[in-house]
Amino acid sequence: MIWDLHCHLGGFDGRTPEEKMAEMIRYADRMGVDRLCVFMGYPFDANPSPETLRAQNDQVLQALTHWHHRAVGFVYLNPNHVQFSLDEFNRCVRDGPMVGVKLWVARRASAAELDPLIERAAALQAVIFQHTWFKTGGNLPGESTPLDVAALARRHPSAPMICGHTGGNWELGVRTIRGVKNLYADLAGSDPTAGFTEMAVRELGAERVIYGSDVGGRSFASQLAKVAGAEIPEAARRLILGENLRRLMQPILQAKGVRL
């Protein structure tokens, strides 16, 4: 069972969201990926307006139209527009088919503006995913590091959250989130170097490590290799490739009547 936490429509061929999604499914089938979590439309916008947020969430909803048996959507929110983001969460998650929240680089995760969004998501047990990166040359304005999402997770200790990319610099990222028990590591997006998965399992426990690819920015194959080639027990590999994500998503999927 392989569930991919981290998928984008951008980077796939196609004139419409439906065509891009069909391409994503075609490659997922080739690599044996069973379910996909899809978020953010296109083109990428570091600080999207309310109109852009709605348009990109509509693109994802459109892409999923024929693929609800294979994929789920996360609503893309911007903490610089708190009330609109709460309304958009209600539209797409509470009253719609989406099951998670995607936060990117508009405002750092340590900011207080994220608190009402996390509270709303946690109330419905929606999956909370925050992009993070440690950039040698400095992050984008508003771009979080694992330090930021760790601060957010400590303020909301009963809400499971996922540290996107584990900061890119995964040795720093794993150490940063190690003591924050409600924070999970996302393997997606960084280069498939040896040791990432092994360190995450050793320091966090296999139950807190989740496979993702970051397609179409990265390939399924290169990111699956981080798990397939890791020197870890088979039971840990199964947790990372799908069982952990399924466990996190099970409450909201069951509430929405999604067959597992």
Image (cartoon, rainbow, N blue to C red):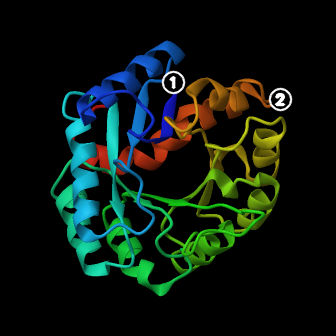
- Quick one: quadrant of the C terminus? top left
Identified at 20% across, 40% down, the residue is: 62
Q: Is residue 97 left or right of residue 187?
A: left
Q: Residue at x 41, y 40 (%)?
A: 10
Name the secondary structure under disc 2: loop
Calculate the distance from the C-alpha at mark 1 to the C-alpha at mark 2: 19 Å
Q: Is residue 55 above or below residue 116?
A: above
Which corner quadrant of the image does residue 26 belong to? top left
Vertical relation: 112 (above or below) 20: below
Q: Position of residue 181 (x, y in %)?
A: 65, 64
Q: Which of 77 and 217 lies nearest the eye of the viewer?
A: 217
Q: Earlier in the sequence, mark 1 or mark 2?
A: 1
Task: Tell which of 188 and 178 is nearer to you.
Answer: 188
Mark 2: which amino acid? Glu
x and y, in percent, of residue 224 in the image: 64, 28
Q: Which residue is mark 2?
A: 231
- From the viewer's side, name the closer residue of 212 and 182: 212
Q: Amino acid at mark 1?
A: Met
Residue 172 in which image quadrant: bottom right
Residue 236 is tagged as none
**Where does label 1 land, which residue?**
1
- 12 shown above or below 115: above
Rate crowding at label 2 as few (under 14), some (14 to 19) or many (20 or more) other CA atoms within 10 Å.
some
Q: Position of residue 236 (x, y in %)?
A: 70, 34
At a point 39% along the width and 76% down the height, the residue shown is: 79
Q: Is residue 2 above or below residue 86?
A: above
